[in-house]
Amino acid sequence: MDIKEMDVWKKSIEFVVKIYRVTAKYPSEEKFGLISQLRRASVSIPSNLAEGAGRNSDKDFLRFLYISLGSILEVDTQVIISQKLGFIDQGQLDDICLELTNLKKMYLGLIKYLRRKSTS
């Protein structure tokens, strides 16, 4: 399986680019705070997908997919904090949260597929 052909990987990469663009407008004093945290967590989403896909077993792949899910939830929490601090507006928050929901569904779908595959 070529990871770069997977829609979930493509959408995850697009999401990282969005987070980088959004956080570029954050106050400079957040460089080592929320900017760094959000960027690292968002990069972790497709990175763990790629690392898991490169592993030798579906069990390993599943473990990395769950790490990606954890990063999705981490980003979700951090963008809510960002909105409460006034770094992004409600519209941006809604847009990012919708993308996170869609990513979460894609990851859960892949997890469900791999779990079914491993039990059959």
Image (cartoon, rainbow, N blue to C red):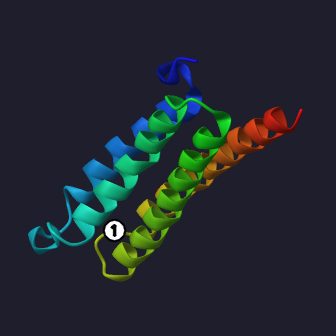
Q: Which amino acid is tagged 1?
A: Ile
Q: Where is residue 51 in the image (x, y as percent from the top left)?
A: 45, 36
* Front residue of 65 and 88: 65
| Left or right of 112 in this view: 68 | left
Under circle 1, the secondary element is loop
Q: Quadrant for the N terminus, please.
A: top right
Q: Is residue 109 above or below residue 39?
A: above
Q: How crowded is mark 1: few (under 14 residues within 10 Å), some or many (20 or more)?
A: some
Q: What residue is disc 1 on? A: 88
Image height of 118 relative to 111, above or below = above
Q: Which of 51 and 103 is in front in this view?
A: 51
In the picture as drawn, the residue positioned furthest to the left comes out as 28
Relative depth, front residue between 114 and 74: 114
Q: How many marks?
A: 1
The picture places residue 47, in percent across and down from the top left corner, at: 40, 41
| Residue 73 percent location from the top left of the image | 53, 64
Rendering coords of residue 34 (x, y %): 26, 70
